[in-house]
């Protein structure tokens, strides 16, 4: 074992992020691509909302685009966004597909994600009830929770890809080929049975006529 392999094996035991040292570049880039695609579609409602506000208030010139974009998630929207970003992680961590390895750091990730979800739900409920005085602090805290949600979602995507077994084209086609072979064998068996039954019936009929 080389020195670099020893270092990677040692770092793979690191709390929470140890799985990063087990993946190869292809798996990492695949997870990064999927995560980027997810983030792009997730933040699209905020961008479109800011664009609509910008078009409506363009004549007044009182606000710029970035301020309007910030206004779309200052009133607790990020808390709901964080919950929607984290909820699928619980399914990935607690459900092990067939032939897949156990999810890395399952207990730690699922527990932390659950705590963040409960915190976001409680803060959003209290905010809508008008029970929060320091709204600025809640907004800044929601930004931190959103960044944490992004980090956990990326780790969940990466770890899910890492634990799944590698499947090649031959393995994917195996069930289909087996089904075709079984069906062909069944048809051939039925044809042989029908032919034998026909021959027996013909011989019995011929023997009866001779008698």
Image (spheres, rainbow, N blue to C red):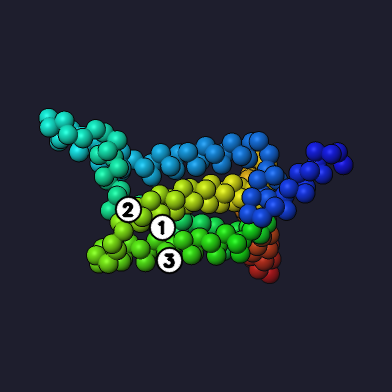
Is 118 or 190 nearer to us in this picture? 118
- The residue closer to the viewer here, 69 or 180, is 69
What secondary structure is marked by label 1? helix
Residue occupying image coordinates x 68% and y 39%: 24
- Depicted 95 relative to depicted 160: above or below: below
Assess whether mark 1 and mark 3 are in contact (beta carbons under 8 angstroms).
Answer: no
Look at the numbered disc 2 and give the secondary structure of its residue: helix
Which secondary structure, mark 3?
Answer: helix
Q: According to the image, label 3 marks what residue?
A: 118
Q: On the image, numbered disc 2 is attached to which residue?
A: 136
User: Alpha-carbon distance for marks 3 and 1?
Assistant: 9 Å
The residue located at (64%, 50%) in the rendering is: 17
Q: Residues within 10 Å of mark 3 (few under 14, many from 20)?
A: few
Q: Position of residue 70 (x, y in %)?
A: 30, 42
Estimate the spatial distance between the alpha carbons at disc 1 and disc 2, rounded to whole Å.
Answer: 20 Å
* Residue farthest to the left, as pictured: 59
Give the position of the N terminus as an image quadrant.
Answer: top right
| Residue shown at the point (66%, 55%) measured from the top left | 15
Q: Which residue is mark 1?
A: 83
Q: Earlier in the sequence, mark 3 or mark 1?
A: 1
Give the CA distance from mark 3 to mark 2.
20 Å
- Determine if residue 188 is in view: no
How would you rate the neighbour count of disc 1 (Cα within 10 Å): few for under 14, some for 14-19, many for 20 or more?
many
Q: How many marks?
A: 3
């Amino acid at each position: 074992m080389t020195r670099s392999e020893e270092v990677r094996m040692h770092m793979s035991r690191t709390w929470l992020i140890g799985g990063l040292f087990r993946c190869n570049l292809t798996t990492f880039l695949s997870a990064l691509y999927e995560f980027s695609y997810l983030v792009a579609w997730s933040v699209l409602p905020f961008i479109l909302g800011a664009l609509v506000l910008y078009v409506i208030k363009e004549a007044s010139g009182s606000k710029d685009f970035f301020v309007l974009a910030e206004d779309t998630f200052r009133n607790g929207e990020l808390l709901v966004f964080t919950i929607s970003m984290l909820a699928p992680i619980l399914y990935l961590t607690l459900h092990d597909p067939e032939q897949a390895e156990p999810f890395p750091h399952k207990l730690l990730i699922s527990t932390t994600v659950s705590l963040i979800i409960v915190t976001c739900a409680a803060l959003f409920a209290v905010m809508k009830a008008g029970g929060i005085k320091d709204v600025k602090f809640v907004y800044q805290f929601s930004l931190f929770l959103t960044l944490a949600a992004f980090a956990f979602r990326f780790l969940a995507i990466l770890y899910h890809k890492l634990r799944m077994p590698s499947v090649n084209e031959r393995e994917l086609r195996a069930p289909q080929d087996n089904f075709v072979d079984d069906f062909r064998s069944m048809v051939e068996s039925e044809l042989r049975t029908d032919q034998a039954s026909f021959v027996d019936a013909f011989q019995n009929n011929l023997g009866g006529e001779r008698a």
